[in-house]
Image: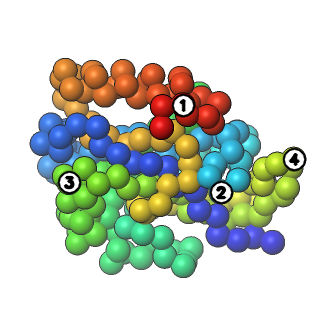
Amino acid sequence: MKQILIETNIFKPTVSINEGKTSSDGNLLVQGILSTAEKQNGNGREYPMEILEREINKYMEVVKENRALGELDHPDSQIVNLKNVSHKINDMKFVGKKVMGTIEILPTPSGNILKALFASNVPVGISSRGMGSLKQVGEVMEVQDDFELLCYDFVSTPSNPGSYMSPLNESLTESNIYNKTNSIITDILCSNDRCPIY
């Protein structure tokens, strides 16, 4: 039976919001991992590469039509509620098994709250919202072929490991280079779902 499936990644800026790149409209742009295929997340679920790739390709049509909107917090609905919209996805692509995205924070009431959270270095999550069914496969719940990706929302609680969002930068600063190096080292040390540095 189909149900709403929600998966969340940490979304944490690594540099000052004042150093971030903006869209042609002057809105803050952030980037990072949206989803990961074939890796168990905090909810015990795993997305097969074939299914996630299919849904990302379909969702890219929504991105191209400038309709890839998301909300601040998940509603109990399959519909994106326009009064709660905080952002839109401008671009997304696979890098290995990770879906990387560029997101524009919109000047809506919810978008302004989100921008203020980033400015205060408050970590938030980027979370996929979809419909589908699950099947127990070994120790994980595998997402089945009927999965349909609906959107990506910003939320407070993360479930997908190793995902960070940060403002796009015009140039590399010493601080940014340090943060990128630190992130790479953390990814290597924590690659087997065991993190000795925490």
Q: Residue at x 41, y 41 (%)?
A: 164
Measure the alpha-carbon separation of dots 3 and 4.
41 Å
Residue kind at label 4, given as amino acid type: Gly
* Badge 1 element: loop
| Mark before the other along the chain sequence, 3 or 2 | 2
Name the disc covering residue 43, or none.
2
Residue designated by label 3: 120
Measure the alpha-carbon separation of dots 2 and 4.
15 Å
Measure the alpha-carbon separation of dots 1 and 3.
28 Å
* Badge 3 element: loop
Q: Residues within 10 Å of mark 2 (few under 14, many from 20)?
A: some
* Residue 196: percent from left, percent from top: 54, 31
* Residue 45: percent from left, percent from top: 71, 53
Q: Hey, which quadrant is residue 13 in on the image?
A: top left
In front of the other: label 1 or label 3? 1
Q: The N terminus appears in which quarter of the rendering?
A: bottom right
| Mark before the other along the chain sequence, 3 or 4 | 3
Q: Is residue 177 visible?
A: yes
Residue kind at label 2, given as amino acid type: Asn
| Mark before the other along the chain sequence, 4 or 1 | 4
* Badge 4 element: loop
Residue designated by label 4: 138
Q: Residue at x 33, y 59 (%)?
A: 87
Residue 161 in the image: above or below residue 123: above
* Residue 170: percent from left, percent from top: 19, 29
Residue designated by label 1: 196
Residue 74 in the image: above or below residue 125: below
Q: Is residue 58 visible?
A: no
